[in-house]
Image: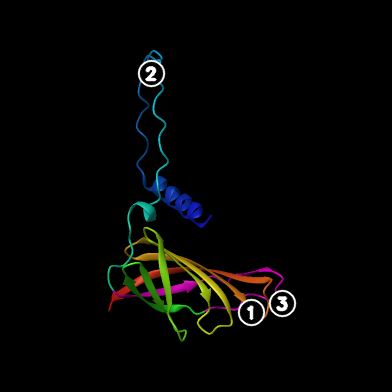
């Protein structure tokens, strides 16, 4: 759903930047039908799937986080997770996400430019799932879902955006 929203926004931006359409060409005769059907076009992949924009070396990113939402049987609103500067270190099969929590998260590559972690939180107070997507050399997004041990029927969901700052 997030991809669809991003693609829609990009399409609107590109449409508003395009020059006015040229005059419509004159109608041409319709070609005679053939016995062989035309090949069915394959759906095109998103930019993140076709071009891996993941950092190739250790880098620092500035992240912002949404207010979040509480899903399921939750006692209160979503607590604000850690955000701000994040150090990202690539590895052969994934990357390390190091924020201000006591332990970094080791994410596995699941697609070109897409990485995921699912397991205990850095302070072992619940289960966290984080999926980060690199949309270009300077931008990323991440969805973080946290289910506390104390409330297994509750999930707190936050969306992040991130901007590249520097290499380390």
Q: Out of 8 and 147, give the one closest to the viewer.
A: 147
Q: CA–CA distance between discs 3 and 1?
A: 13 Å
Location of mark 1 (residue) = 149
The residue segment tinted magenta is 58-81
Q: Secondary structure at mark 2?
A: loop
**Considering the image in quadrants, where does the C terminus appear?**
bottom left
Inspect the magenta stretch and tell me whether residue 47 lies in it: no
Sequence-wise first label, 2 or 3: 2
Sequence-wise first label, 3 or 1: 3
Location of mark 2 (residue) = 27
Kindly check if marks 3 and 1 are in contact, taking CB atoms under 8 A apart as contact: no
Number of the label disc, if any, that sits on residue 75: 3
Crowding near the residue tagged with mark 2, few <14, some 14–19, many ≥20 C-alpha atoms within 10 Å: few
Q: Is residue 126 left or right of residue 63?
A: right
Between circles 3 and 1, the one closer to the viewer is: 1
Q: CA–CA distance between discs 2 and 3?
A: 64 Å
Whole-percent x and y of residue 35?
40, 15
Sequence-wise first label, 2 or 1: 2
Q: Out of 119 and 30, give the one closest to the viewer.
A: 119
Specify the quadrant of the image occupied by residue 155.
bottom right
x 71%, y 77%: residue: 75
Specify the quadrant of the image occupied by residue 29.
top left
Q: Secondary structure at mark 3?
A: loop
Whole-percent x and y of residue 62?
40, 75
**Considering the image in quadrants, where does the N terminus appear?**
bottom right
Kindly check if marks 2 and 1 are in contact, taking CB atoms under 8 A apart as contact: no
x 34%, y 32%: residue: 22
């Amino acid at each position: 759903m997030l991809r669809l929203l991003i693609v829609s926004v990009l399409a609107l931006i590109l449409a508003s930047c395009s020059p006015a359409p040229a005059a419509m060409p004159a109608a041409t005769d319709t070609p005679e039908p053939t016995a062989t059907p035309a090949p069915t076009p394959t759906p095109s992949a998103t930019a993140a799937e076709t071009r891996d924009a993941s950092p190739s070396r250790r880098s620092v990113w500035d992240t912002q986080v949404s207010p979040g939402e509480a899903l399921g049987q939750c006692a209160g609103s979503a607590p604000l997770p850690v955000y701000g500067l994040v150090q990202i270190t690539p590895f052969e099969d994934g990357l390390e996400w190091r924020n201000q929590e006591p332990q970094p998260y080791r994410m596995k590559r699941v697609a070109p430019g897409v990485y995921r972690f699912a397991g205990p939180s850095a302070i072992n107070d619940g289960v966290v799932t984080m999926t980060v997507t690199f949309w270009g050399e300077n931008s990323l997004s991440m969805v973080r879902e946290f289910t506390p041990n104390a409330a297994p029927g509750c999930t707190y969901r936050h969306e992040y955006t991130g901007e590249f700052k520097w290499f380390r």
